[in-house]
Amino acid sequence: MAFCQPEVGRFFATICELVALETGPRAAREAWQSTQTKNLLRHAQKRSLFWRERIAAAQSAGLAGLPALRRADVRAQVKNEGALLDATDSIGVFSHSTSGSSGAPLSFFCSEISSLYNQMRSVAQDFIEGRDLRLNRTVVKYGFRPIKDGLSIQRAASAFGQCSSFFDGGRGRFLLYRQLDAAQLWTALCKDQPIGCLVLPTNALDMLLQHAGPEVFRRAGVAMISLYGERLDPQVRSRFAEFGVPIRQTYSCEEVGLIAVECDRCPDFFHVTTSNVIVETIDRQSLNAGEAPVGNVLLTHLHSYATPFIRYEVGDLATLSERCPCGHDGPTLSNIVGRTKDLIKFPDGRLRAFRLRAGDVLAIAPIEEYRIRQTSPTKLVVEIGGARALTPKETTAFVNMLKEHSDESFSIEIKTVEKIAWGHSVKRLGFHNEIL
């Protein structure tokens, strides 16, 4: 690689390693994961009393001997010990929080290495699937902070960053939106055409379909759609397939990043991103999704050195298989249960994304659990779990935050309850729309 700049060569070489790791022999992949797991456990034992006690009590340094890690466990470790990386490690660390889909908000620490991995793994997927690298890439995300005019757009000469010198790749565009309706967001998307590969949350696609059908997407230059967040309605996939626009879903969470990517040949089967996570399921015998046995999903994030996520119970159910029907010889998830659409409905029928950051909720009050329900076109009901009532100042702050994410016309009712009645729901969802 002497013909290119060192950092560019390393970036490209790492992508090649990721592709080889996830598509190569099972034995080599499992040996690599075993080494990474031992390194992570060794680090956690050295830096954390929480983890030393946890591993010692399990009488094993392997994964199987450790209990499931729950949000309350992570919250306690972060509160008492902070990040497990410091200045001596020469690795940047920053605080992060869950996106608000769960009613149990969580703040934690990430490393810059983990963020860099997420960028490279995204590029690696294009090589794994043999996608057309010349396509533009348009990424749409919801903004949790106020944005001037509700929209922020960043453009890049290449969608592949440092690797752009290796091949003729398409242009990149990143749209951050907030409080835009479907027509406004679609107008912003169409300012630069062709759109190419469109990456967006499922609820944003649902919004856009109020304004533009699949045929309009095709005319705007959408060659494929990559979805994250909630599960896709099969009928939506079929509608786009009629116009030659494939849809691919990803399965991820804020705590660990990418977990699995939908197979390009077998819809609803997800190849686990084994370069990032080890996935387990437990209690398979007692639960079923249709005819298939499912279990609670446990995740071990192999890059989580700042805040370890080891056998972390994310709150979803899924079926875990040794391989995919397509022939991929690697762990595969299907029947994923627990994802839902975070959409608020207005009296005129419009739908808009509704997402809260855990950090914003915790900045108002130390809330351990909450649930927001839309019970009518103009009313939100908020339940705060625990015996402690909100102060008038906290209540006002909570109401103002909800109105920013909904509308001034909404009435907000806040209830303090001893314990939220979650029922039999697998995932304790922070927002639930009862009128959709």
Image (spheres, grey):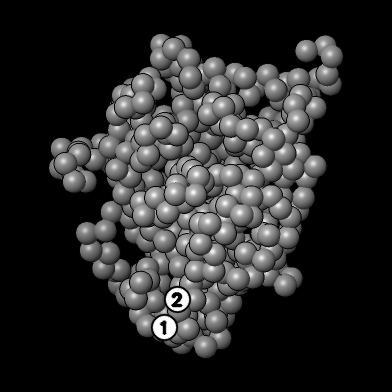
The residue at 52%/18% (across/down) is 21
Give the crowd class for mark 1: few <14, some 14-19, many >=20 residues within 10 Å: some
Residue 46: tell me if it is visible.
Answer: no
Tell me, yes or no, whether the two marked residues, 1 and 2, touch with CB atoms within 8 Å.
yes
Residue 275: tell me if it is visible.
Answer: yes
Give the crowd class for mark 2: few <14, some 14-19, many >=20 residues within 10 Å: many
Answer above or below: position of 157 versus 164.
below
* Horizontal side of residue 107 vs 16, given as left or right: left
Q: Which label number is shown at residue 137?
A: none
Report the front residue among 186 and 334.
Answer: 186
Q: Which label number is shown at residue 377?
A: 1
- Quadrant containing the C terminus in the rendered view: bottom left
> Residue 418's x, y, as percent?
30, 72
The residue at 68%/70% (across/down) is 150
Answer above or below: position of 144 versus 92.
below
Answer above or below: position of 338 versus 400.
above
> Residue 73's x, y, as percent?
40, 46
| Amino acid type assigned to the residue bearing label 1 in the image | Pro
Q: Quadrant of residue 127?
A: top right
Instruction: Look at the numbered disc 1 and give the secondary structure of its residue.
Output: loop
The residue at 80%/27% (across/down) is 165
Q: Which label number is shown at residue 345?
A: 2
